[in-house]
Image (cartoon, rainbow, N blue to C red):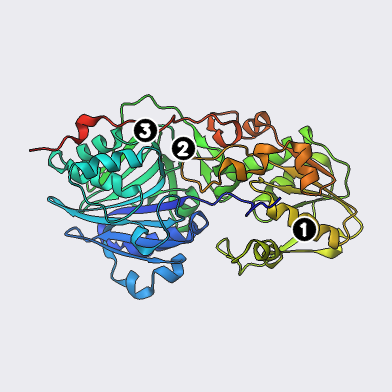
Amino acid sequence: MHYGLDKFKEECGVFGIFSKEKKNVGDVVYYGLFALQHRGQESAGIAYTDGQKVSLKKEMGLVGDALKKEDLETMVGYSAIGHVRYSTTGDSNVQNAQPLLSKYKLGSISIAHNGNLVNADIVRELLEEGGCIFQTSIDSEVVLNLIARGYKKGIERACFDAIQAIKGSYAILILTEDRLIGVRDPNGIRPLCIGRLGDDYILSSESCAIDAVGGEFYRDVQPGEIVVIDKDGLRSYNMGERTSLKTCAFEYIYFARPDSTIDGINVYQSRVKAGENLFKEKPCNADIVIGVPDSGTHSAVGYAKASGIPYEIGFVKNKYVGRTFIAPTQELRETAVSMKLNPLKVNIEGKRVVLVDDSIVRGTTMKRLIELLRKSGAKEVHVRIASPIVAYPCYFGIDTPRRSQLIGSSLSEEEMGIELSSDSMGFLSIGGLLDSLDSKSFCLGCFNGIYPVSAPFEADKFMFERKE
């Protein structure tokens, strides 16, 4: 049985700044995007305004490759938004890179979006029937066209109306000549927060990027909130929908940086607590606890702390092979695991090892890691996973395989242990995960198949009737 790569792919990251004084806003966004690089490595871009026009620079690749020094030197203005992308909808090419920029009758508008719209195809079709022409294959352009279509009402009302027509997960930044707008979906599935840098305002996917530019965290954008920032300061509107916080649990398990705090929960502390709960639920007699770098190490620390088993470094990570490392065939992908992670034999040989990771999606990487540990002389390898079994796909901005490709959709915990050749296998329960997250409400669809947004939403036809 063959399984592919062993992790969910990240979604995207957004970062924006608004200043009352003209300055090099591109530099600030550039460093903010660097701090969000873990959220997407396919492309990067920055749109900025000098108060008269909105300009854009975007390219494929990492932030440091896509945005050059000479590009940043020209980005002097009052406001800017940036985006790092991993494609969840649309092909991976520069045309689909973000931010997107469009001109309409009242000026220019740029948009950067993290998430996924479950009704994008329906809305796109209705817009095309009404005469809209699309330049890209990504759902962010659907939002852009909806806003441009309602320009006569003013940008804020146009944004409000556009948001009413879409369903799914989104943290959206919108830039015009004179204002910066941030929107978070009614369930808060994707994170978005507000920071201050002196008198300037920042909007960011994660608080770690606010820290990186020397700013201070102000607050999270609430589910269903629209934040408008201009020369008069910050204003807040609510979409009017019934909202309930259902942040994606995988933000804490894997996606977010450990130095971020999302909706009042520190990511690192939640991972350590998940490891502690994992030991309570799935104890093991062993000599050492090791973690799979990077996100598995935090839960390994918690498992070691709760168990009293010493925590040791088990794998050395090659810092120069990023998450974007690509191998052309299944066989090479499996071999390539050792390009990224190499066992520290001196710590492993002759030991009973507890190997802690944050999740298993398909299973290939975990199987290879177990093989590497055995080759390095491990007497026993007991796998412990600091999240529940991933048994269902995600529709909200994570590149998820079909259910048939998820190892947890067809195999039990014990069967997975046999399939992956571990001495034992244990996953954290949903209750244990929620306890590590202060028992608040989250999107757990990939674990239990229950999603906060139902099947694709049939948009109201009257919103798209062609105006004669």
Q: Which mark is residue 142?
A: none
Q: Is residue 201 visible?
A: no
Q: Position of residue 129 (x, y in %)?
A: 21, 42
> 98 or 285: which is nearer to us?
98
**Residue matched to label 2:** 189
For badge 2, the amino acid type reads: Ile
Gap between marks 1 and 2 measured at Cα: 34 Å
Gap between marks 1 and 3 measured at Cα: 43 Å
118 on left or right of 296: left
For badge 1, the amino acid type reads: Ile
Give the image quarter of residue 333. bottom right
Q: Position of residue 22 (x, y in %)?
A: 25, 61
For badge 3, the amino acid type reads: Gly
Mark 1 or 2 closer to N-term? 2
Mark 3 or 2 closer to N-term? 2
Q: Which mark is residue 313?
A: 1
